[in-house]
Image (spheres, rainbow, N blue to C red):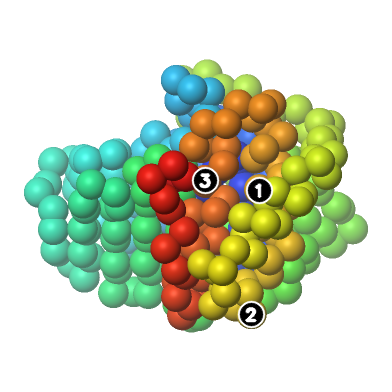
Amino acid sequence: VCSTWGNNHFKTFDGDMYQFPGICEYNFASDCRESYKEFSVHIQRALNSNNHPEIQYILITIKDFTMYLRPKLAVVDGRIVKTPYYSSGVLIESDDIYTKVYAKLGLTLIWNQEDALMVELDSKFNNHTCGLCGDYNGVPVYNEFINGLASYNSITYGNLQKISKPNAKCEDPDETQALPNCNEHRDECERLLTSSAFADCRLRLHLETYIQACMQDKCACNGNEDSFCLCSTISEYSRQCSHAGGRPGEWRTEYFC
């Protein structure tokens, strides 16, 4: 499973977690074999009116079949379709919160129509993928952030996944920017992610990576307590826990998220 959510967080198929603030069109995950590519997933990232990153649209090709997804809109091979839509081994479903795509060749995609996207791939694509999700070789860091003798930071790596479009006007983020130290938020993030609602998640996920992501969210929001800053990583933790077979309890309340 590869995912992106919240304040520019990415988690590769091999489990590396990194931050990449680019706002262009990127190869999220594609079959990168030389001969015949079975699928590709491209995403266009942008900042919304509250200055939070989100995904504007997703472009999926499965063999010769093209899908263009926007919130509450699905376009297949150039025409708008009603969901649920099924054709050529691909099912598109959509409700008020999620757009989901299931492809028989071994791909499931779930998008919350805002910031969070998750792609699950069949293991037959091991070692065959490229993009922001990495090469799916089962080894963290290698070939994404260390390739031969070259080592990349996450921003260099992200910039390499940009789809060059002749008329696109988007700047690559600066590769020298360092992540801030957000330790003052550790206690709060730890408290939220270890609440009793997540008891069934502790052994299924690597908690520390989500604590770090939550800390970065809080930092980036500079004391602005809107739901995006607080809830994106907790929502992702909850989604990933369910996906791993866990049962998160009721953690949302009337006053929280």
Q: Label 2, secondary structure: give it.
A: loop
Mark 3 or mark 2, which is nearer the start of the sequence? 2
Q: Residue at x 82, y 35 (%)?
A: 180
**159 lies left or right of 242:** right
Tell me where residue 63 appears, x and y as whole percent: 32, 62
Label 1 crowd (10 A; few <14 / some 14-19 / many >=20): many
Q: Residue at x 69, y 26 (%)?
A: 222
Mark 3 or mark 1, which is nearer the start of the sequence? 1
> Does the rendering let one see residue 29?
no
Tell me the number on the disc at residue 203: 2
Q: Label 3, secondary structure: give it.
A: helix
Residue on which disc 3 sits: 231
Q: Amino acid at mark 1?
A: Cys
Disc 2/disc 3 C-alpha distance (Å): 21 Å
Q: Examine the rendered structure and indicate whether residue 201 appears above or below residue 253.
A: below
Q: Residue at x 81, y 41 (%)?
A: 184
Q: Amino acid at mark 2?
A: Leu
Label 2 crowd (10 A; few <14 / some 14-19 / many >=20): few
Q: Examine the rendered structure and indicate whether residue 256 appears above or below residue 194.
A: above
Tell me where residue 87 appears, x and y as whole percent: 14, 64
Tell me the number on the disc at residue 214: 1
**132 lies left or right of 247:** right
Tell me where residue 238 appears, x and y as whole percent: 49, 63
Q: Label 1, secondary structure: give it.
A: helix
Disc 1/disc 3 C-alpha distance (Å): 9 Å
Tell me the number on the disc at residue 116: none
Tell me where residue 129 appears, x and y as whole percent: 56, 64
